[in-house]
């Protein structure tokens, strides 16, 4: 596993009724959770992301189906396929992210350490490179 791709393995509790996974801030999620959002109905071939955050910790979990996440810290670019509700990808500050290859019915849920704030986004890759290299 690379330095950029940090995956959390969540315990699942399975019985004949199915599987349950519990996520708790500051326990199996490494921050207090202030926001949860999710993406559904992403059309075939569509891409999302293409930005970084100044100060935001997130964990992304693909609850159904799969998608590809590319992370870029300005030095290296690495990718991972999220395809399990028991795997969480940790995405820290100042990491550019790109999401693609959503399968039909994919549900990507993201837990975030801060409320939504458009001012926290860096949506220009050249500006991102200037910030991380300074
Ligand atoms: C991220 C990746 C993984 C809100 O109003 N509240 C929210 O909490 C979020 C996340 C978004 N929005 C609005 C802002 C835009 O008008 O929803 C619209 C779509 O957001 P955006 O184009 O930023 O979505 P993605 O999928 O490109 O990126 C999202 C998150 O925004 C981002 O923080 O890390 O998922």
Image: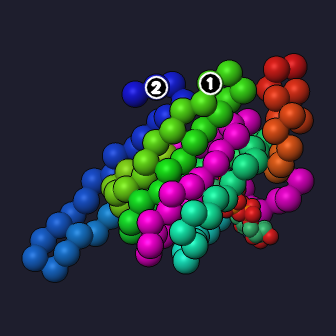
- Residue 112, given in percent of the width and then of the height, sits at 63, 56
- Determine which residue is flagged by label 2: 2
Question: For this rendering, which residue is in front, 64 or 86?
Answer: 64
Is residue 92 toward the left or the right of residue 103 in the image?
A: right
Res 27 seen here: no
Is residue 83 toward the left or the right of residue 112 in the image?
A: left
Is ligand 1 closer than 8 angstroms to the Cβ of mark 2? no
- For residue 72, what is the image quadrant? top right
Q: In the image, what residue occupies the spot 86% across and 34% down?
A: 126
Asked whether residue 115 is drawn in magenta, I would say yes
Question: For this rendering, which residue is in front, 53 or 34?
Answer: 53
Res 105 seen here: yes
Q: Secondary structure at mark 2?
A: loop
- Residue 116, given in percent of the width and then of the height, sits at 77, 63
**Which of pointers 1 and 2 lies earlier in the amino acid sequence?**
2
Disc 2 residue crowd, few under 14, some 14–19, many 20+, Cα 10 Å: few
- Determine which residue is flagged by label 1: 76
The N terminus: image quadrant: top left
Residue at the extreme front of the image, as rendered: 45
Disc 1 residue crowd, few under 14, some 14–19, many 20+, Cα 10 Å: few
Asked whether residue 105 is drawn in magenta, I would say yes
Q: In the image, what residue occupies the spot 82% across and 20% down?
A: 133
Q: Which mark is residue 54?
A: none
Q: Across the whole image, how many numbered discs are drawn on residues?
A: 2
Q: Are marks 1 and 2 in contact (CB under 8 Å)?
A: yes
Q: Is residue 53 above or below residue 101?
A: above
- Residue 65, given in percent of the width and then of the height, sits at 39, 66
């Amino acid at each position: 596993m690379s330095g950029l791709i940090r995956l959390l393995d969540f315990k699942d509790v399975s019985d004949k009724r199915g599987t349950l996974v519990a996520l708790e801030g500051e326990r199996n999620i490494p921050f207090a959770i202030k926001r949860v959002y999710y993406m559904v109905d992403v059309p075939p071939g569509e891409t999302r992301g293409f930005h970084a955050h100044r100060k935001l910790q997130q964990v992304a979990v693909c609850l159904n189906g799969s998608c590809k996440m590319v992370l870029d810290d300005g030095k290296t670019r690495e990718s991972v396929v999220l395809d399990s509700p028991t795997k969480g990808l940790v995405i820290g500050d100042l990491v550019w992210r790109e999401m693609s290859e959503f399968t039909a019915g994919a549900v990507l849920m993201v837990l975030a350490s801060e409320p939504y704030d458009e001012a926290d986004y860096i949506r220009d890759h050249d500006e991102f490179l200037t910030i991380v290299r300074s």
